[in-house]
Image (spheres, rainbow, N blue to C red):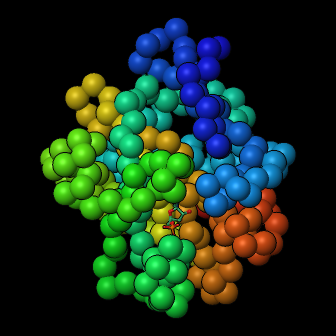
Amino acid sequence: MELLYEGKGKQVFLTEDPDLVVFRFKDEATAFDGVKKESFGGKGEICATITEILMNLLEKGGVKTHFVKRISQNEMLVKRCTMLPIEVVVRNYSAGSIAKNLGLKEGIKFPFPIKDLFYKSDELHDPMLNDDRAVALGFLTFDDLDVLYKNALKVNEILSNFLLEKGIILADFKLEFGKFKDSILLADEITPDSMRLWDKDTLEPFDKDRFRFDLGDLLAGYRLFLEKITS
Ligand code: C5P
């Protein structure tokens, strides 16, 4: 297969069908713009499984995604999108960059989900955008932004409710979207690499913060999360 793109956590390959690509999850975990990096055997497979489960759940709930089907342990077939150079973050609880930048304690529940936009650029360390900046710089239109926000909030509702039933708090998460023909699809992955997931009772994290801040075995957290969402 011809490699189309390689990122920190994935490889994307062309297929014979121009509308479809293969998305392969790598075993590497990276943090702090790739400064911290480590390989965990089996991580790609766990992340593929989690993405498959959550993308299917979202599709059922009416969110259009790029997911087509799982084709191997660590690969899925997806629709080939033109990616928007934007990350949409939804925050239910204070943590990470918002806590650091605004001097907040972690774990404060916000009165409504906060939507943040970031420009995808490792060189610039993913600077924060706002609606006007994103549109004025030509990344997308205000109508596109509407679609992104509506979808991001829908994803938040579906995932928060589903996870809470499994004893997990969805503190925050990041989404990426791409254009496919005339529609905007939820793309990329949905894994503990891009979400903050806390045990409802102990607030213990299951997500990549374990790796970022040496809070415990990364894969054990991901496995526990997978067990909980499949039980
Ligand atoms: O870093 P920050 O606190 O803004 O991250 C918010 C959420 O978005 C976290 O769940 C984090 O894992 C995710 N994120 C991501 N990729 C980035 C930035 C943030 O997956 N480049």
Figure check: 211 above or below 140: below
Q: Quadrant for residue 180, please give it.
A: top left
Relative image position of residue 2 (x, y in whole percent): 62, 14
Q: Quadrant of the C terminus?
A: bottom right
Query: Which image quadrant is residue 227 in?
Result: bottom right
* Position above or below: 193 against 46: below
Task: State the residue at coordinates (56%, 69%).
Answer: 196
Of the pair 38 and 42, the residue shown nearer to us? 38
194 relative to 84 in the view: left or right: right
Left or right, 225 with reference to 108: right
- Quadrant containing the N terminus is top right
Q: Residue at x 66, y 58 (%)?
A: 31
Q: Residue at x 28, y 42 (%)?
A: 139
Percent x, y for residue 23? Answer: 58, 31
On screen, residue 93 above or below 191: below
Q: Position of residue 67 (x, y in %)?
A: 47, 35
Q: Position of residue 141 (x, y in %)?
A: 18, 44
Left or right of 209? Residue 181 is left
